[in-house]
Amino acid sequence: HLEGIGFSTKVYKRKHIGDHLLFTTPKVAGDKILFLGHNDTVFPQGEFESFSEDDSWVYGAGTCDMKGGNIVALQALRNIYKTNKQIK
């Protein structure tokens, strides 16, 4: 998603845990913004198996984790790109 709006991706391979990804834009003068997030959800064995939902909410491990914030950050970057035709 980020490469489509001008970001480069660097993958830091990890042997025993998930890879780390670094997304950057070309270096330019001026103020900077750092978005830092994660997509993993770690719980003890046996605690991630349940999931349920009703008409308004979902329930279960990780359902209220950082993933929503990551989507908000991505959409903000998309809006900046759409307005400026680039990310600086």
Image (cartoon, rainbow, N blue to C red):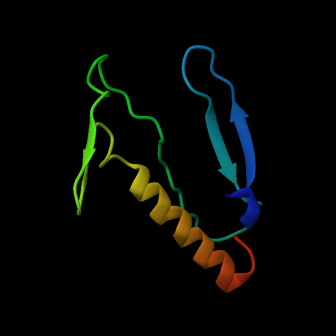
Q: Quadrant of residue 10?
A: top right
Q: Is residue 74 above or below residue 39?
A: below
Give how far across and how far down residue 46 sits, in percent: 28, 18
Q: Is residue 84 above or below residue 74?
A: below
Name which residue lies at 27% across and 32% down: 50
Can the viewer see residue 6?
no
Q: Quick one: quadrant of the C terminus?
A: bottom right
Give how far across and how far down residue 60 sits, in percent: 26, 40
Q: Quadrant of residue 68?
A: bottom left
Q: Quick one: quadrant of the N terminus?
A: bottom right
Name which residue lies at 31% across and 25% down: 43
Along the line of sight, the residue nearer the viewer: 37 or 75 = 75
Can the viewer see residue 11?
yes
Compared across the picture, whether 72 is left or right of 85 comes to left
Along the line of sight, the residue nearer the viewer: 6 or 41 = 41
Give how far across and how far down residue 86 sits, in percent: 74, 75
Compared across the picture, whether 86 is left or right of 62 comes to right
Along the line of sight, the residue nearer the viewer: 16 or 26 = 16
The number of numbered discs placed on residues in the rendered structure image is 0
Q: Is residue 77 above or below residue 16?
A: below
Compared across the picture, whether 8 is left or right of 21 comes to right
Give how far across and how far down residue 15 sits, in percent: 63, 15
Compared across the picture, whether 33 is left or right of 67 comes to right
Name which residue lies at 43% across and 50% down: 67
